[in-house]
Image: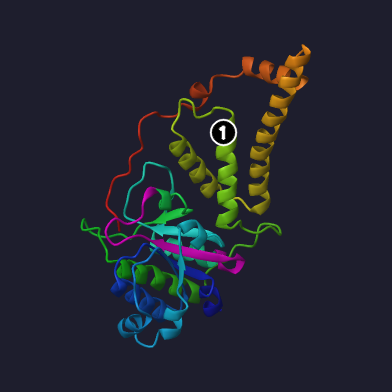
Amino acid sequence: MSESLLSAVTVVLYEPQDPINIGAVVRAMKNMGVSDLRLVRPCKYDVTRIEQIAHDTRELAESIRHYPDLDSAIADCIRVVAFSARRRAAKVERLTPRTCAAELIELAPDGRVAILFGREDHGLPNEALDRAHAVAHIPTTDHKSLNLAQACLLALYELHLAAGDATVKRAAPRHATSQPAVAELEQTFIDANNALAAIAFYRTRNPELIMRSLRSLVFRAKPDVRELMLLRAASIEVLRTIEREKKRAVKEALAGLEPSPVVLAARSALENTPDADEALAVPSKSHADDGEPQ
């Protein structure tokens, strides 16, 4: 049972810089029963050298896949947890390695899950952390910086334990729906961003911060595929309605006609709606992250 669960686990290294660390991660994966390693824009390395660092791992080393960007590396994953020591202003789900492992193993029967690690020098940038459903933090002393392979081994150890723990209670699936993959989530965020831009929502706001908050909200809500498609459909319909009304307005203006019922209804609703700034009270100051990479 544990082997089948661990086969759904993926390790993603974002821009690893040292072949020795790649080899050490391969060794840790072999030790703990995980076999899917994906590298985003890695340094140059040789498979023979990797096997010298991690003995008897050639099959795993030869199966390593490379990706040009993080989105393509995690596109098929239903849950991604980033390991980082950084404290973020955005509200994100924060896990320990143990709670991370329990959550991922619980979801493993439904699809591929991933743990994500950053560069040795700077960790994960904001745009990479934005793609993660949650962030895991490894408790340490004030000396927070961990070697990449050490951090990965700790995470894999907890996953190995969780997968082999027969006492883990697995939640029943919600109805017959499945968890959305990252590719589906990203397309939903693109549509939502386009809809907000189309209604000039960003004219006094920072789009990056708004979308980061929206991502955090959706990730914490953990929508299934049906719920996510509902959100995406709403965004698409906003765009289509705007386009239809633009065309209608041009025709009415040329013909000297009264505005359409949709436009009149929208005007009426706006007259009784508070300003978005008052309703949302979105902070205007920058949400700069602090802390150190892990």
Instruction: Identify the element where label 1 is drawn.
Output: helix
**Compared to 264, does 212 lie above or below?**
below
Q: Nearer the viewer, residue 268 or 40?
A: 40
Residue located 60% across and 69% down the image: 109
| Three-letter residue code for mark 1 | Leu
For mark 1, what is the residue?
196
Image-based side of 150 in relation to 132, left or right: left
Residue at screen point 63% across, 53% down: 224
Q: Is 52 positioned to the left or the right of 9 in the image? A: left
Residue 273: give x, y in percent of width and height. Answer: 60, 19
Residue 165 visible within the image? no
Quadrant hosting residue 256: top right
Q: Quadrant of the N terminus?
A: bottom right
Q: Which residues are magenta?
A: 107-126
Q: Is residue 11 above or below residue 232?
A: below
- Residue 151 visible? The answer is yes
Magenta highlight on residue 228: no
Question: Quick check: 229 above or below 249?
Answer: below
Q: Work out which quarter of the rendered image holds the C terminus and state it.
A: bottom left
Q: Is residue 249 above or below residue 7?
A: above
Between 288 and 194, the one lying in front of the other is 194
Residue, x 35% and y 84% (percent of image)?
48
Q: Is residue 108 magenta?
A: yes
